[in-house]
Amino acid sequence: MWRVVTMPLPQERDDDSLAVIRELRQRIQRLRRHVLEPGVLRAQVSYRLPMVRRMAARPEVCARHECFSKASRAYACAVETAGAPLPSSCKTTLDTLQWWVPLTKPDDPLVVERAIRHQDFPYRAIAQTRDVSVGGVMLDIGANVGRMSVSRVVLGDAALAYCAEPDPLNFACLVRNTLDNGLRGLVLPDRVAIGGTEGTVRLLRGKSAGGHRVLAEDEPASGETVEVPCLPLDVWVERIGADLDQVRFVKVDVQGYEVDVLRGAARVLSCRHIAWQMEVDLGMLSARGVHAGTDLYPLMQQSFTHFIDLNRHQLGDRIRPVGCLPEALAYVTAGSKGRTDVVLFNLDPAFSAEFD
C-alpha cells in the first residue's frame, strides 16, 4: 500500500529554520543575563582603587603591615629598598594601576614591548570563581607579580591577600606593585616557595616570568637556577599569622609542584570553608615524575566534594563531584590541550545532591 508523504514547501522549511534560529538566539541572550561579564570588573578598577587606598591608611592595616614585616624579612628588605632602581624590569600602566613587569632581555626593545603587551589581569577567572571565592582572606601561592591578588583586592573579592612568590625578580616586582598602588598592608608578599617540607629548593628560571618551576630533588637543571627557601603551607600560614577562619580562597599556580603543596597543607585542607583554585598541567607534573590520575586527583578527592573546570570551551555541567575529575579532565591528555584550571570546594551534603 502506498503512503502519501507531504513534503514541506521550501518557504515552509525556511520559516521553520528561522524560527529555530530566533529561539536559539533568545536562549543565548537569556543565558548571558545570568553570566558575570569580565569587562564590568575591568571597568570598575579605577573607581574602586581610591577607596582601597583609603582603607590601606587605616591604623589596623598599618599595624598588620608592621607585623608582617617582622614575620617576613624578605618583605621588610624589599620595602626598605623600594626607592632604588629595579633592574631587568619596566614600569607600565594597566587599567589605571602602576605595574612593574619582569624582563628576560631588558635591552631588547621587542622583548620589552612584548612583555608589556602580554600583561593582563585575570578578570574572566575572577568572574568564573565568584560563587565560591568572594570575601575574606586570600592565599596566593605562586603569586608571580600579583595579577590575581592585586586585582582581587582592588575589586573587593578579597579583603586581604597573603602572597608567596619564590623568584627574586618576580617578588621584587610584586612588592613594587603593592607599594606603588597604595596597597601596603592589604597585599602582603613573602619570598618563599610552598611545598611539602621545610628547607631549600632549586628554582629553574624559565623564559617568561610565569615559567619558573621548582625542580625535583634529583632532576638535572636545563638552565639558570636559584636556591629559594621552602615551607609547607601549614607552617607558612602560622609564621605569617594568617587566620584560617578568615581565609576563603587559595590560588595555587606552582608549575607542577601542586602535589607537594597539598601534602604540606593538611591543616588548611581541613578547613572545609576554603575554596582552592589549582592548575592541572600534565607536562609540568610529568617533569617532576608525578601523575594526575595517581598522585594529584586522589589528594583533591580526599579534601573536596565538588569542582569547576574553568576551561570555558568544554561542555558538561559546570559543577561536578570530585569523583568525576579523571573523566571530566580526560581531554587534557589529548593533543596540545595539556592544562586547565579547576576550582575545588565543599558543599553541605544536604545540598550536594542538587549538583551530583
Image (tube, grey):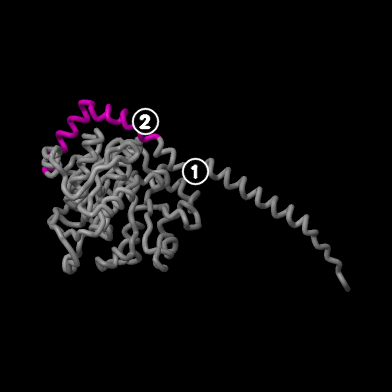
Determine whether the residue tagged by mark 2 lies in a helix, strand or loop.
helix
Whether residue 262 appears in this view of the structure is no
Q: Residue furthest right?
A: 1
Q: Which residue in the protein does label 1 denote?
A: 35
Q: CA distance from mark 1 to mark 2?
A: 22 Å
The magenta segment: 44-73
Which amino acid type corresponds to the residue marked 1 in the rendered image? Val
Q: Residues within 10 Å of mark 1 (few under 14, many from 20)?
A: few
Whether residue 296 appears in this view of the structure is yes
Q: Residue at x 15, y 39 (%)?
A: 82
Give the number of the mark in front: 1 or 2.
2
Q: Which residue in the protein does label 2 denote?
A: 47
Q: Residues within 10 Å of mark 2 (few under 14, many from 20)?
A: few
Which amino acid type corresponds to the residue marked 2 in the rendered image? Tyr
* Left or right relative to 151: residue 330: right
The image position of residue 322, as x and y in percent, is 40, 56
Determine whether the residue tagged by mark 1 lies in a helix, strand or loop.
loop
User: Is-magenta flag for residue 62?
Assistant: yes
Q: Which mark is residue 344?
A: none
First in sequence, mark 1 or 2: give its number: 1
User: Is-magenta flag for residue 300?
Assistant: no
Question: Chief secondary structure of the magenta span?
Answer: helix
User: Looking at the rendering, which quadrant does residue 104 occupy?
Assistant: bottom left
Q: Residue furthest bottom?
A: 1
The image position of residue 153, as x and y in percent, is 31, 37
User: Looking at the rendering, which quadrant does residue 221 occupy?
Assistant: bottom left
The image position of residue 254, as x and y in percent, is 26, 55
The image position of residue 261, as x and y in percent, is 25, 55
* Left or right relative to 55: residue 353: right
Q: Nearer the viewer, residue 244 or 171?
A: 171
